[in-house]
Amino acid sequence: MVSAPIKSAQSAKVISNAALKTQTVNLTVLGAGAWGSALAALASRNQHNVSVWSRRSELSLADAVKGADVILSAISMKGVAELANRLNTEVAVPESAIIVTATKGLDPATTRTPSQIFTETFPTHPVVVLSGPNLSKEIEKGLPAATVVASTDEAAATQVQTLFASDSFRIYTSPDPLGAELGGTLKNVIAIAVGVCDGLNLGTNAKAALMTRAMPEVIRIGTHLGGQTETFFGLSGLGDMLATCTSVLSRNYRVGYGLAVGKKLEQILAELGSTAEGVNTANVLIEIANREEIPVPISRQVHRLLNGKITPQEAVEALMERDLKPEVCDLF
Ligand SMILES: NC(=O)C1=CN([C@@H]2O[C@H](COP(=O)(O)OP(=O)(O)OC[C@H]3O[C@@H](n4cnc5c(N)ncnc54)[C@H](OP(=O)(O)O)[C@@H]3O)[C@@H](O)[C@H]2O)C=CC1
Ligand SMILES: O=C(CO)COP(=O)(O)O
């Protein structure tokens, strides 16, 4: 399955960033966590009008989205479906507003991605996915980073690109929202596996093998769900996998590391105090893999580990003892 063709015919047109930056955009960020706050700061630095809403804020959702040109959701996956429903039924979303989603997860009730939820809820609005190797703590410090804004509406993707782009945040557009979103989502489960690998001190060879063998697994399930193969080799796929699997800043990596050094999942999550989407994603991913009969050996061991069915050591043994086979990538 491939993504729908892009609506706009501007693919060859080079748009002047300088010209677009002169237009001030009214941006509403929904979610005042680590990622929503970092993205709001990037847009503020570009002189846009930014308001940030969260379920704890005094600002009502209706007031937050009033007059918005762009509405960006950066809340945890568990709240996305409810938020989309509230936006649809309780408030007046401006007709021409672009909806951007920066959440990396799968809906536990329906297995849908955030962009699928927003597209189904707001079929007349352009929906853009923002996803890439973006550890928010580094971005907050102004360290250089790159990301992808992906949409079937190329003009909308270009507008979002301009809204956030700066000398320290380089943004590429893509016509594959599902691929960009799924790369960022599925790698969280792999980051848990790599955290286990490091927590058990299994060495660099093991870590390289794990990340490399994770690629066909991510591509197999990601393409089955509608992403394009090449997207998984880009910033939002391989790029995000490398960032998340090799940084102690990653909360998903820290979940795996903590389990490997003998902590309980509940304790690790309490200590994190923020979202580690890979825990929920592992459950939804295994539901999909079982239903569609897609082999996901690494994610399956992560799922068993998270659900207390095996120890970290047993998870490693289960992976090493699989039948021997040729390397040739069994992508589909
Ligand atoms: N941090 C990062 O480096 C990056 C994170 N992401 C993704 O962004 C998303 C958010 O992550 P992050 O900001 O780090 O997480 P945080 O835990 O820091 O913040 C989560 C935000 O979501 C809100 N939220 C949680 N549940 C609900 C709900 N049921 N209804 C409404 N709002 C809710 C929280 O509100 P409250 O404060 O009231 O609980 C908070 O504003 C995740 O999907 C993550 O994978 C993507 C790229 C980088
Ligand atoms: O998605 C991220 C980096 O791109 C953030 O990773 P964690 O959610 O594991 O911290």
Image: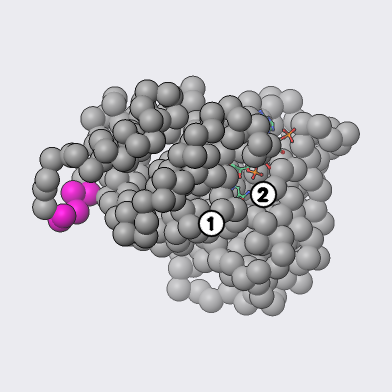
Q: Secondary structure at mark 1?
A: loop
Quadrant holding the N terminus: top left
Q: Residue at x 74, y 34 (%)?
A: 92
Q: Quadrant of residue 167?
A: bottom right
Would residue 270 be visible to someone looking at this image? yes
Q: Residue at x 71, y 60 (%)?
A: 140
Instruction: Give the vertical position of 45 relative to 200 (above or below).
Output: below
Q: Residue at x 62, y 71 (%)?
A: 144
Q: Compare marks 2 and 1 and give the one earlier in the sequence.
A: 2
Residue that mark 2 sits on: 35
Question: Of 210 and 329, which appears nearest the observer?
Answer: 210
Q: Quadrant of residue 285?
A: top left
Front tag of 2 and 1: 1
Residue type at mark 1: give it.
Ser
Residue 300 colored in magenta in the image: no
Question: Of 141 and 204, which appears nearest the observer?
Answer: 204
Residue that mark 1 sits on: 247
Instruction: Give the vertical position of 226 relative to 111 (above or below).
Output: below
Residue type at mark 2: give it.
Trp
**Magenta segment:** 327-331
* Relative image position of residue 272 (x, y in whole percent): 64, 39
Which colour style is shown?
Answer: one colour
Residue 330 colored in magenta in the image: yes
Q: Is mark 2 within 8 Å of ligand 1?
A: yes
* Relative image position of residue 9 (x, y in whole percent): 46, 64
Q: Is mark 1 within 8 Å of ligand 2?
A: yes
Distance from disc 2 to disc 1, alpha carbons, whole Å, reads 16 Å
* Relative image position of residue 152 (x, y in whole percent): 47, 52
Q: Main secondary structure of the magenta part?
A: loop
Whether the residues at callouts 2 and 1 have beta carbons within 8 Å, the answer is no
Quadrant holding the C terminus: top left
